[in-house]
Amino acid sequence: MSSESIGRILPVHGASERFAKLRKLAVTAGPLVALELLFFIGPLAIMFMIATMEMQSLVLIPNYGIDNFVSVFAEYVNRVAFTNTVTIAVSTTVTAAIVAYPIAYYIARFGGAHKNQLLILVMVPFWTNYIVRIYGWKIILGSQGVVNSGLMALGVINEPIGWLINTKFSLWLGLTYLWLPFMILPLYSSLEKIDRSIIEAAYDLGASRTSVFRHVIFPMSLSGLVGGSIFVFIFSMGAYIVPAMLGGGELFVGTRIAYEFGIGGDWPMGAAIGSVLVLLVGGTLWALIGYVDMEEMF
């Protein structure tokens, strides 16, 4: 057989192999792709479609356009809602990271035989409905709550502190408390996987505790920190219960969407706000996902 004939056969053979691999992939991943389309892509597509429509007398009118998306950025209440949401979500993420890191580090490094019990304590709040837990904060932070009553009994204050409840502070506190375990668990997972011989080698070479943390422990736990930050930030951005129960009317994206789909009676505007939120969160996830291996986090 001539070299020219072989050159004609090899590409065909390679193409058939690629086709076989694609067919095998389609058979294997087909059900998963179908489920993704049905339960994820499909609802998102419907939401984006509704966002381009109009609503008159509680009836969707298929007059497609981008006016609702323009209004998301043009209307003052929407701009304030997104500003508040991003600010509080970032603050919650930073606070959760600061609080969670020493907890995760202690469990991973010094937990010993009690690691499982300590992790169970971290997960205990999941055993109670989070609405009940957030309502507990209303009792703690209210004008007649535990904090104000205790401070007044001690003579520290003469009247209840007003900014403890129904403010951005209570929003930040409630979200931090609610999502803190989602920061602790990924951090613990990454810290637990650090080879202790590397740390011991750094100490043997004369590194101080600060240097070991800065140059060994922290860089090797960055995957868990980024993963936990992704969880806390995304959950905070899409929160509704906490702003509704502790926000006291503070403008928040979740409550704005609920208003438009409820009392406001403007589904396309609610869908447009939700679509912008999805794009914003999706962009953040896309930017951070390269710094974390999701398979290695848990």
Image: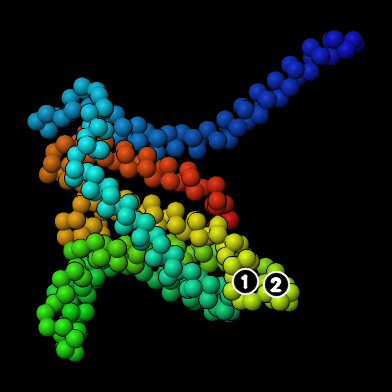
- Three-letter code for the amino acid on which mark 1 is drawn: Ser
**Mark 1 in CB contact with mark 2 (< 8 angstroms):** yes
> Is residue 218 left or right of 261 when viewed as pictured?
right
Residue at image x 19%, y 69%?
163
Q: Check disc 2 and report the residue beneath it.
A: 202
- Three-letter code for the amino acid on which mark 2 is drawn: Ala
Residue 211 has which mark? 1
The correct choice, above or below, for 102 with respect to 59 in the image is: below
Res. 224 in view: yes
> Is residue 85 left or right of 34 when viewed as pictured?
left
Residue 213, how many percent across, how many down?
A: 59, 70
Residue 49, how many percent across, how many down?
A: 29, 29
Of callouts 1 and 2, the N-terminal one: 2
Q: Residues within 10 Å of mark 2 (few under 14, many from 20)?
A: some
Q: Residues within 10 Å of mark 1 (few under 14, many from 20)?
A: some
Q: Is label 1 or label 2 in front? A: 1
Task: Depth check: give the residue in front, 181 or 113.
Answer: 181
Residue 207, how many percent across, how many down?
A: 67, 74
Residue at image x 74%, y 16%?
12
When asked about the image quadrant of residue 191, the answer is bottom right
The correct choice, above or below, for 266 with respect to 221 in the image is: above
Residue 248, how many percent across, how many down?
A: 16, 60
Task: Depth check: give the residue in front, 54 or 66.
Answer: 66
